[in-house]
Amino acid sequence: MKKLMLGACALLALAAASCGKCGEGNCKTAANDSLANAYGEYVGTMLYGEYSQFDGDKTQKQDFLRGMQLVFSADGSRDTRMGMQVALQMMNELSQLEEQGVPVNKAAVMQAFKKSFLADSIGYMDIQQKAGEFQDLYRKAMDKAAAEKEAEAAAAPDATENGLAAAEYIANLKEQGTDVQTTENGLSYVIENPGVAPKPTETATVVVNYTGKHLDGKIFDTTEGRGPATFNLQGVVPGFREGLMLIGKGGKATLYIPGNLAYGNNGQPAAGIGPNEMLVFDVELLDIAE
């Protein structure tokens, strides 16, 4: 904005210098026209580069122009401009809701807005009540949208396939007679060394050596070669936390963490972990710092 104002001042100076070259009645109009043209061309050129960088579609630019023309064609009253600003802010918020899976009827929003805005009187308690009602409905709508997304992700072919593979993997281990146990939460594990008491609590900070693998044995993360890891158990996936709480200092175990206790139905694509994928961790609890 500072650059824009400096440019405008320079243009005004040029216009003032040229006043002697035009008739007294036409000088002001000519200067204003020059300023208007320069301002429009400057902003248009600047936004051309910015907008084309992200969109570049002429149809989208026409939509952009329609929005500008709507504002420029409105009367110049302060209240009209404020109404437009509020409407644009509300539209942005409604668009964000839609992106999160919560579509909203805009006509209903406008009707409800007018009813309240044109009311004869609204007290402080009314405002508090309406705010509470909105926040409650907003939370419920977001929870519902999140549940629907979770259900959709859980039903995806990859998530279903990984879940079946995990169940089959654990069933085969138990059939082979390995000492695999499973907790009520669904974590399967084999304890090689129980370690010494006490065991860590769910809020403990621990020092651990570990190697994380896929069911096919491929390693995706390990402390080997970089030294033990220190972290608070609140900062790890639920299955890893539950597994470390089963052993004491010096203990060793293998954890078979199902998808719902690991990275869920979305997985961790950046780490190569698929949706609802079971992870295998060989862990050694070196120390506990409560």
Image: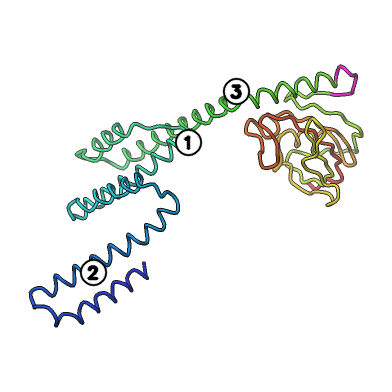
Instruction: Please give the label number shown on residue 92.
Output: none
Horizontal arrangement in the rendering, residue 30 relative to residue 37 (left or right): left
Q: Determine the secondary structure under disc 1.
A: loop
Residue 256 percent across, percent down from the top left? 79, 29
Q: Give the range drawn in magenta.
A: 174-180
Q: Give the amino acid at mark 1.
A: Gln
Q: Give the amino acid at mark 3.
A: Ala
Of pointers 2 and 1, the one earlier in the residue sequence = 2
Q: How far apart are marks 2 and 1 (CA)?
A: 44 Å
175 drawn magenta: yes
Give me the residue at 49% from left, 30% from top.
Answer: 145
Q: Nearer the viewer, residue 77 or 243?
A: 77
Dot 3 and dot 2 residues touching (CB under 8 Å): no
Q: List the residue tagged with mark 2.
A: 35
Q: Which of 128 and 172 is in front in this view?
A: 172
Q: Determine the secondary structure under disc 3.
A: loop
- Asked if residue 169 is positioned above or below residue 224 in the image, the reply reads above
Give me the residue at 60% from left, 23% from top.
Answer: 155
Residue 78 percent across, percent down from the top left? 21, 55
- Asked if residue 110 is positioned above or below residue 181 in the image, the reply reads below
Residue 48 percent across, percent down from the top left? 37, 57
Q: List the residue tagged with mark 1.
A: 100
Give me the residue at 66% from left, 38% from top.
Answer: 268
Q: List the residue tagged with mark 3.
A: 155
Q: How far apart are marks 3 and 1 (CA)?
A: 19 Å
